[in-house]
Each structure stands twice: as structure tokens, then as C-alpha cells.
Image: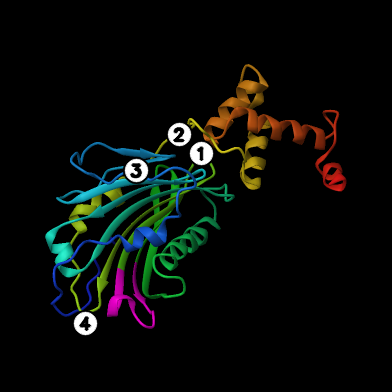
Amino acid sequence: MRQRLPLTRSACAKSHLAAGLLTFVLVLTLIPRPSRGQPDPWILVRDFDTRIETAGVSVLPPRGLGWLMSRRENGPNRYIIFGKRSADVAQRGHSIIAIVHSEVTDNLSSSGPATLPLLEAMARRLIDSSGPPGAVRIRDFSGSASDIGGSICFRYRALTHEYEDPPPAGKRFFALTAGLTCLHPDVPRFIALTVGQRIPSESQPIQIEWEVRPFLEKPAFRPLALSAHPPARIPPGVREWAVRMVFEHAQAHASQWAAISSIAEKIGRAAETLRSGVRQAERDAGRRAGLTTDERARLK
């Protein structure tokens, strides 16, 4: 069944709110603060047919007037954020956002019986973090499996309420969310697309289904490009996977260094960083002289 956004809610009354500025409340709560530098400035989206790419995935931007775009990064994690600014949105006191998440994960398999429950848990985690800590309650949630580029994904939609006491700005809010969670088919990255509309309890949802449909339905996985300043460390689960890939695919390359460089590019790390992990694995296996991991630990 086709996902529809926003969900209907018969109890919503028509808005009587005064005009105000659009606030990206969900952006501030969903996205970690950048680890260095400043986030990109918000820019107006004018081209709706050119794909926008971040680490491992590209998307079509939401269509329609008033969509702004910015980027965030937190270590190896990357985010693209779209926020809708219009007179109607501001008058009703809504916040409407669409976010692309690309995050390093230790979960390496993009298929198998355990994948779908894992992706559903990821979706619920995103929803839980979409408001003030401990204040979000899921009232309605549904989802199903979806195949994207050969990888199992989980499409979902949800209705949530915020329970803060006292409520922020004297108002209570609910939120309508639709999204997609995936594991990248080639590299250990969690990819998610989310669209959220945060609404004062006395207001009606704004119909944005047509605007966000291409964004939600047409993501494409991409090889992971190596950034100019890759992180110095590799998460343990990712490192083990990358080292194993170097050993398993070394014969397909001209040299071990070529294999290391190829795998390092896939995980967005410097080849020298991965080479250190490979050398330590060789020492642990007795294939190279030097201290093993256990011996290093005992010396600390």
C-alpha cells in the first residue's frame, strides 16, 4: 500500500494561530551539533530534478516553493536537511523538515532475517529523538519492507505526541512522520530518509505528500567518496569488516596496498588508518612480528 503523508487526524481543529517565523525545532533535536566548523548556510532549493548527494546516498529534493537546504556533519556522519518556509507554514506555527541521515554503523549486513527488525528499531529511535528527551510518545506506527537498489529497507509512518509539562510556548504538539531506513548494500552505513511535520494540537496538517514523494521514493545508493579530512579512527565493527575484506579480496588487486586503498575508500577512511588495522590483525594471527592486541592491553 502506498504511503501517504500527512496522516489524517479528525480531531484536529482549524488553526487560529497568529503569523510567526518558521522554527526548525526538529532539526535542532534530531541532528547532533557539528564536531568542527559551522553548518552550511540555508540555501533556497531551485532545481528539483538534480540529485543531491551525501556520503553513500543521493536524493531528489522536495518539490514546491519555500524549501531550504543545509548540511550538517558529526565526525564521519553526514546529514542533508530540508526545511519548508512559507506564509502558510509560518501562520499555522508548523515546522516541516526532510532529513537525509548517513551514519557509520557496526551492523554490516543489508539482508537476512534480522535486518528488518533492526531497521524498524532504527526508525523508532529516530522518532524517539525527534523531540525533547523523554517527551515523544508514539501513538500510531506502521511500516513494511521495501527493496531499494538490492538492499532491504523499511518504510514507515507514525503519529506522535509531545508530552512536556508545561508544554513549550504554552502549546502542545503532535507530529506526523514518514520515512525510510536502510543499511547501505556495500559499506557499513545506516541510511535514513525522514519527513516530519510538527503541528500545534489545535491545527490541521498541511498537505505536502506531492512535494516529498520524490524525496522518499527515489533514493539511490552511491559509492562512498573519501573526504578531504577523513576521521582518524575506525569504529571496531567497521574495522573488523574492512580488515576481513582486505584479506578476502587481496588477490583481486595488484597488491595488498591496492586492496587496502580500495576498501578504505568504501568506508570513508584514510588508507594508512586501515593499513594499521591490517598490520595489527596480521600480528594477532602470528603472520607478522610484533605485539598482539592482548599483549598491548596487558602492558597498559
Judging by the rendered image, the residue that carries numbered circle 4 is 11
* Residue 171 highlighted magenta (yes or no): yes
Kindly report the distance in space between the C-alpha atoms of the residues bearing marks 4 and 3: 39 Å
Kindly report the distance in space between the C-alpha atoms of the residues bearing marks 1 and 3: 28 Å
Mark carried by residue 223: 2
252 displayed left or right of 143: right
**Contact? badges 3 and 2 (CB < 8 Å):** no
Location of the N terminus (image quadrant)? bottom left
Could you tell me which residue is drawn at 51 percent across and 43 percent down? 76
268 displayed left or right of 149: right
Give the answer, above or below, for where 89 lies relative to 228: below
Element class at badge 2: loop
Q: Residues within 10 Å of mark 3 (few under 14, many from 20)?
A: few
Is residue 67 in view? yes
Q: Position of residue 133 (x, y in %)?
A: 46, 71
Amino acid at dot 2: Pro
Amino acid at dot 1: Asp
Q: Which residues are magenta?
A: 158-175
User: Given this view, does label 1 or label 3 mark the residue nearer the observer?
Assistant: 3
Amino acid at dot 3: Asp
Judging by the rendered image, the residue that carries numbered circle 1 is 186
Of the numbered discs 1 and 4, the one sitting upstream in the chain is 4
Judging by the rendered image, the residue that carries numbered circle 3 is 40
Element class at badge 1: loop
User: Given this view, does label 1 or label 2 mark the residue nearer the observer?
Assistant: 2
**Contact? badges 1 and 2 (CB < 8 Å):** yes
Give the answer, above or below, for where 196 lies relative to 138: above
Could you tell me which residue is drawn at 62 percent across and 45 percent down? 235
Q: Residues within 10 Å of mark 1 (few under 14, many from 20)?
A: some
Of residues 196 and 86, the one drawn nearer to the viewer in this rendering? 86
Judging from the image, the colouring scheme is rainbow
